Amino acid sequence: MTTAAVFGTGSWGTAFSAVLADSGTAVRMWGRRAEVVEQINAGTNEDYLPGIRLPQGISATTDPAEAAEGASIVVLAVPSQTLRGNLQGWARLLPRGAAIVSLMKGVELGTTKRMSEVIAEVGGIDPERIVAISGPNLAREIALRQPAASVVACVDEQVAQRVADACAAPYFRPYTNTDVIGTELGGAVKNVVALAVGMAEGMGMGDNSKASIITRGLAETTRLGVALGGDPATFAGLAGLGDLVATCMSPLSRNRTFGVNLGRGMTVDEVIAVTKQTAEGVKSCESILQLAQDHGIDVPIIEQVNAVVHEGRTPQQVVESLLSRARKAEVD
């Protein structure tokens, strides 16, 4: 039996652990909080997925060495901005030859590195062992075993297939891809676009407005991803358009919900105070904007979201700025 170690007991880490277990993989989870670990060992995670029973085959521990021991797949599911610090403590524990899987969707502040780049740098991991998983995968729906698909990306197609085999549940269909760059960028940028869509929702705008933001947000994501070496086809697939639509339109989306509250007039600090889980786009919008500027890529929606989150602009000012931009051809 394949054994997977999952570092992180949040909603997506727990839901993906359930997918692995339902696929016949033995799962050992690591969690920082003893009370959450106790819940998981009792078959639930009420803090993050209340009311949902976890399948057999999942155990949890607060000891990272115990979680990692003998695992052929190691899954990292912590907030993206904490990865570097966490991995510095875990790197020596990771089994040699294990596939290292990133569920994280962000770009590191300061370095503008994607999560796979941080894993390679801090963990000393060969990129051929690093896997990125991304797609329209709202954690609660997955944990409820509602059908969904995702992308398992690795530059080594055989490693991608090995991880896909370990998470192919009756309700979860993984597709493989060798475009790690595009897969990661799609997952990171969609959180920022979802903040913009949420703001539109909070301001009372309709579906035309939200569809326009989603479409132009996809154009920004594709421009940036291609400039970094991603495949344009990736952004039309599950890790691009699929994830973008789910995150922008679902009330289960933390980033969309964060944006809704901003659109209703709450300040960033007020929204953070009432938000229980990490909204990755709030932190990553700054680093994604820096990444785009470093490569000379025009990303007006990302720029305006960053202005609201970090510069004190109001959502109404953002709307005015975007609509007053010089007109141009839709396709560059």
Image (cartoon, helix red, strand yellow):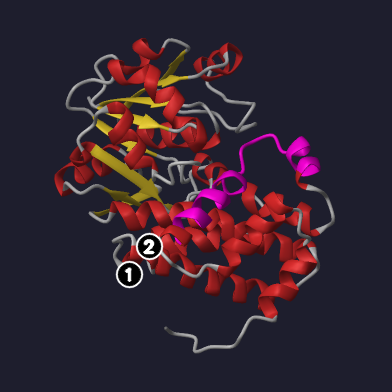
| Residue 23 visible in the shown view | no
Residue 124 screen position, x and y as percent = 24, 28
Q: Is residue 201 depicted above or below 139 in this figure?
A: below
Dots 2, 1 in contact, CB < 8 A: yes
In the image, what residue occupies the spot 14% across and 45% down?
158
Secondary structure mostly seen in the magenta stretch: helix
SS type, badge 1: helix
Q: Which residue is mark 1?
A: 232
- Residue 225, disc: 2
Residue 155 screen position, x and y as percent = 20, 49
Magenta residue span? 269-292
- Between 291 and 264, the one nearer to me in the picture: 291
| Residue 49 visible in the shown view | yes
SS type, badge 2: helix
In the image, what residue occupies the spot 48% across and 27% down?
8
Residue 23 screen position, x and y as percent = 32, 36
Image quadrant in which the N terminus is located: top left
Looking at the rendered image, the disc whose residue lies closer to the viewer, 2 or 1, is 2
In the image, what residue occupies the spot 39% across and 66% down?
235
Q: Is residue 170 depicted above or below 120 in this figure?
A: below
Residue 76 screen position, x and y as percent = 40, 31
